[in-house]
Image: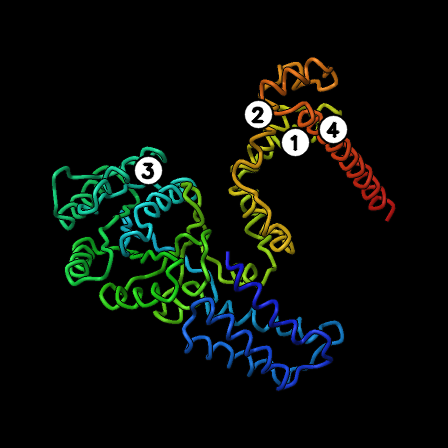
Amino acid sequence: MFEGLSDKLDKAFKVLKGHGHITEINVAETLKDVRKALLDADVSYKIAKQFTDDIKDKALGQNVLTAVSPGQLMVKIVHDELVALMGGEQTEINLKGDPAVVLIAGLQGSGKTTFSAKLANHLKTKRNKKVLLVAGDVYRPAAIDQLKVLGEQIGVQVFTEEGSKEPVKISKGAVKYAKEYGYQTVIVDTAGRLAIDKEMMEEIAAIKRAVSPHETLFVVDSMTGQDAVNTARTFNEVLDFDGVVLTKLDGDTRGGAALSIKSAVNKPIKFVGIGEKMDAIDIFYPSRMADRILGMGDIVSLVEKAQEQYDEEEAKKIQKRIARNQFDFNDFLSQIRQIKKMGNVKDLMGMIPGMGKAIRDLDIDDNAFKGIEAIIHSMTPLERSDPTVMNGSRRKRIAEGSGTTIQDVNRLLKQFEDTRKMMRMMTNNKGRNMGQMMRNMKRN
């Protein structure tokens, strides 16, 4: 995500490395590189110039503290300006309605239908809402079938009117149906075109007048850069939408849309799409995105993803098993499944501060645990619960059954044993440290 922009900004800050204080000369040199990095990321010249002018005004005349280098101070200033450029604060989706109607608009190919299903899944699982999806794209071949498949996948009903080519009538019928059957949120997926045309804009405007949505979201492909910003302007003139959704942020995006769109249309980015899976949707936080652009990671999002999969009772059981040296491959497999539920492994590692550059060239995908899982699944119940029974013939059988080599099996067994020892040591130390802390509290 924004790797090219991150690299160029990092190089720009190095201009100040070794300087004892900020001057107009070294600031000008740094900001020249910053502006070039933004232009390369497909940010408009006007926005890039205003951005660097604001940074210059804030940077010049600032005293550099003893513990802070000029480079560090400039990073802080740029970070704050990036946050402001992308909207400042996170903005919530408006769901105040009975039912709340959410209208989804955008060009064909931007990811509207997929996002509609992702949003339905998000509201169902995270906000406990009863959601109705509406198949309003009556022109694109298989659009209705696509939404039906996605709806079935996430367990959300899809409203359709078979044979109808009137999206306004379909949308009104869906809202009426939702009121009758107690749906709390209605998400209307609308048709797009390959380019903006008068007919499409009139139709989406008519749908908005008919259903009076509480929230209108404009979905845009972040990989289209400045074109996305220009499209957003046109849609906003007609719809006056409430927020923006950036899709395909996990692709080869330069970042221009994310950095420019708030300034261009004065509407907040509310969600980002980061993959094809139905849970690959994130609420947009400008400060966290600025952290990632500047290579600082996103530890808050990482913790939140972990908490979503965290089972407190299961964690207590695991801790007890570790303390008793009973942690086995069944427990290990359970932990792997929890990690996989959090999302793409490389994306998760990239959220750790300082890890982004280290793993950039590594080939880490969703199948990173495939070999380990295959080996564990090839074990008998006894072997999973008691790895000490492993002899040569067992290891050979497991390797053949998992499609791996004996060396792979041996490597996993050694790594597992080393991990188990380390986990037990940490658990025991934690217990001793806690006991010592309690004794100190009593003594004091």
- What SS does tag 4 mark? helix
Q: Residue at x 73, y 75 (%)?
A: 18
| 206 to the left or right of 377 | left
Check contact, mark 2 vs mark 4: CB within 8 A: no
- What SS does tag 1 mark? helix
For the residues marked 2 and 4, what is the alpha-carbon distance in whole angstroms?
Answer: 17 Å
The residue under label 4 is: 414
The residue under label 3 is: 150
Check contact, mark 3 vs mark 1: CB within 8 A: no
| 387 to the left or right of 85 | right
Can the viewer see residue 307?
no
The residue under label 1 is: 316
Whichever of labels 3 and 1 marks the residue nearer the N terminus, that label is 3
| 352 to the left or right of 259 | right
Q: Nearer the viewer, mark 3 or mark 1?
A: 3
Q: Amino acid at mark 1?
A: Lys
Q: Nearer the viewer, mark 1 or mark 4?
A: 4
